[in-house]
Amino acid sequence: MTEKDFLPGAYQKMPKHGKVTWKAPSNIALVKYWGKKPVQIPANPSISFTLDSCATTTSVSFEKKADSELFSFDLLFEGKPKDDFKPKILTFLERIEKYVPFLKAYHFTIETSNSFPHSSGIASSASGMAALSLCLMDIESQLNPSLDNGLFNAKASFLARLGSGSACRSIKGNLVQWGMHKNIPNSSDLYGIEYPFEVDSVFMSYCDTILLVHKGQKQVSSTVGHQLMHGHPYAENRFRQAFSNLDTLKAILASGNLEEFIKLVESEALTLHAMMMTSMPYFILMKPATLEIINKIWQYREETKTPVCFTLDAGANVHLLYPASVKEEVMEFIQNELVEHCENGQYIHDRVGMGATKIKG
Ligand code: PMV
C-alpha cells in the first residue's frame, strides 16, 4: 500500500455527534528504530513485542460544528485539562488531516489515561498515539461504513506513525514489524505489520518486567536523538546491522533458540545506547542503576542459566525479558537483587499482548 491508498473517498454519512473509545498497548522493540527521514520514515526496519497491561485508553467525543475552518479540541489527561499536550496533538492533526479530512468538521473532546503510573518514565507516546489514531479511524468508519478491516488497521498504524514512529507498532499483537525489508513480504516504511513468519510458542507468553530506574524527564528527547543520526559517523553501519539482525531473528523466532535471542536483543539495546554516546553532541540516558542491573542480570544468568535478558528503550529503565516458564525464579531474583536499584522500589510486570481493543461505551 502507498500513501494514496490512505486517502479516503467521499464520506457517505456525517453523524452529528458520537463517542468512541480505544485501548492501545505500549510496545518494546527487539530490533530498534533509531534514525529517520522526513516524514517519520525509519532509517532501518524494527520489530517489537506488543505489551499487554501497559496501555493508554482514549475516548474521543465528537460534535459537528458550524464552521470547518480550524481544528477545535479539548484535551483531558486522567480527568484534568492538559494544555501542555495540545501543541503535540495539533501538529499531529495537521500532519494527518489530508488522510482524515473530517477533522475540521467536528469539535473533539479527547480524554486519555494511562494504565501505568503517571511520570513513570515509560513513554506513553506509542500507546497514546495508537489509541488516538484508532479512535479517529473508528470515526472514519462511521463516515464510511464500507471501510474494510485490513485497511482500518493499516491506516490506524499509518496515522499513529505520523504521531510517533514506534506508535505504528502498537495496533496489533504479538510481534509487529515496521520498515521495508526485502526479505519480509508486505513490510512497509509507512505502517507496521503483524510479523508474517513462524514464531515459537515460547515467545507468545514472554514476560517483560519494567524496572523503573529513573522516572524524571529525559535529558535528550527521542526526537532529538533520531536527528543526531544524521551525519553520525556510525549510522550507515548501524542501519545495515538492523537489516541483518532482522534476518538473523527470523530463524531465532522460529526455533525458540533463547541463547541466540538473548545475544541479539541485548546487543541491539547496547547498540542503541552506543549510538547516543557517539552522537555529536553525545549523551547518556543510562543511569548508574541501569548498569548495576545489567551486571546483575549477566551474573545471575551465568550462575543459574536462567534465560533472562534485558533490553532498553530511549531511557534509563530496564526491560527484563524472560519466558513465562521461569517467572517464579525471576520474581525472586527481582525481589532479592534488582528492586533495590529501582526508584522507590517500583517495577511493572507485563507480558506480550494481542494488540489494541475497542472499548464498548
Ligand atoms: O517512536 P519514537 O520516535 O519515540 O522512537 C522510539 C525509539 C526507541 O524506542 C528507542 C526504539 C524503538 O524502536 O522503539
Image: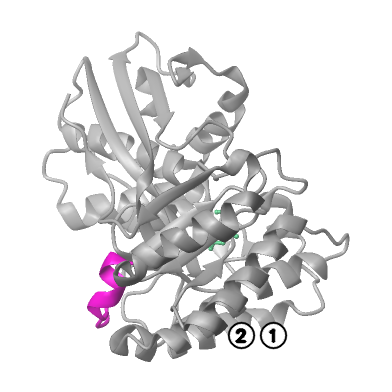
Where residue 4 sits: x, y (%)? 36, 57
- Ligand 1 within 8 Å of disc 1? The answer is no
Left or right side of 251 for 150: left
Residue 245 tag number: none
| Residue 318 in view of the camera | no
- For the N terminus, the quadrant is bottom left
Q: Judge whether 135 appears above or below 273 on screen.
A: above
Where residue 326 sits: x, y (%)? 35, 70
Left or right side of 154 for 340: right
Residue in the image at 43% along x and 47% along y: 160
The residue nearer to you, when weighing 170 against 135, is 170
Q: Judge whether 184 appears above or below 106 on screen.
A: below
Residue extending furthest top? 66
Marks 1 & 2, CB-CB < 8 Å contact: yes
- Give the Cα distance between marks 1 and 2: 5 Å
Determine which quarter of the picture holds residue 360: top left
- For the C terminus, the quadrant is top left
Where residue 118 sits: x, y (%)? 53, 31
Element type at marker 2? helix
Q: Judge whether 133 appears above or below 329 on screen.
A: above
Left or right side of 156 for 85: right
Residue numbers of the magenta segment: 196-206
Q: Which residue is mark 1?
A: 237
Q: Is residue 197 magenta?
A: yes
Q: Which residue is mark 2?
A: 240
Residue in the image at 27% along x and 79% along y: 199
Left or right side of 293 for 139: left
Residue extending furthest right? 281
